[in-house]
Image (cartoon, rainbow, N blue to C red):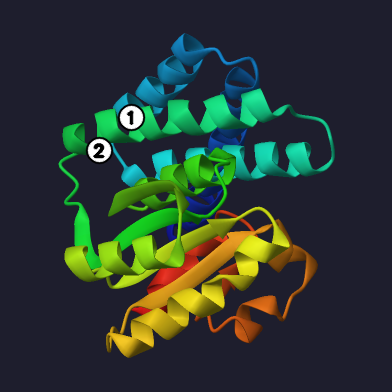
Amino acid sequence: MYDIIRNKYVFIYKGWLKMNDIKVKSTNFKDALMRVDRLKAEKIFKSTFEDEENFKYLEEIVINSLNIIGEDWDKGHASLAQVYMSGIICENLMDEYLPKMNIDRKISPKLAISILQDYHTLGKKIVSSIVKSGGYELIDFGPGLSPNDIVNKVEEEKIDIILISTLMLPSAMKVREVRQLMQEKNLKTKIVVGGAPFRLDKNLWKMVGADASANTASDVLKIIEGLV
């Protein structure tokens, strides 16, 4: 009986140590990203990979760090350059280490991301990094697309879920046109929207005919799983 109780507490203690270790690594990784120190970020990433060989922990470090950086940007504590470069570094690291861990990319559902009318790429970079950290393949349609451009690409690539990012309200309202064009072509593609207009108006995504709205980049993974 004593051994059972002791083993239980040893297991709990080891779990606490692991959670604390990941928390520390996430903080250090975030600090490296904020300094745009790719070498330091890669060192933390590499050490986690070598210690754990578990994709779950790498995913946690990326998502936790990018979420905090995104919150810092909202509060004015991080610059656009820091957020943008953080997304690039994370995306490159995920592309480099996923093959090493022999993790099969999730090819279903087929995903794509685009920026409707606007040319900002900040949010797209962060979302792309987090989606890739979830093991998904993601086609990047790029910025400055019209509703017709998006629908034509969706049809051509046979996309199951399209992630649409907008910066301004007029662009957000154009999502309605994307939905209408899809209906005319009888496309069953799901639309997930994100960006400032949808954070400010919690019901806007419904008004424009989207299937879901992501308030934060990490919400996207949950939404994708839910739509699947």
Residue 156 is tagged as none
Percent of width and height locating residue 218: 55, 56
Asked whether the beta carbons under mark 2 and mark 1 sit within 8 Å of each other, the answer is: no
State the image coordinates of residue 75 (x, y, percent, origin top left).
Answer: 84, 41
Q: Nearer the viewer, residue 141 or 16?
A: 141
**Few, some or many residues within 10 Å of mark 2 (<14, 14–19, 20+):** some
Residue at 64% x, 24% y is 81
**Label 1: how many residues lie within 10 Å, few (<14), some (14-19) or many (20+)?**
some
Viewer-closest of 186 and 223: 186
Query: Which residue lies under the disc numbered 1?
Result: 49
The secondary structure type at the circle numbered 1 is helix
For residue 187, what is the image quadrant?
bottom left
Asked which quadrant contains residue 205, the reply is bottom right
Mark nearest the camera among 2 and 1 is 2
Relative to 40, residue 97 above or below: below
Left or right, 220 with reference to 69: left
**Mark closest to the chain's N terminus, 2 or 1:** 1
Q: Which mark is residue 98?
A: 2
Name the element at disc 2.
Answer: helix
Q: What x and y, as percent, mark residue 117?
A: 53, 54
Using residue 176 as the reference point, say whether residue 179 is left or right of it: left
Residue at x 37%, y 53% (from the top left corner): 134
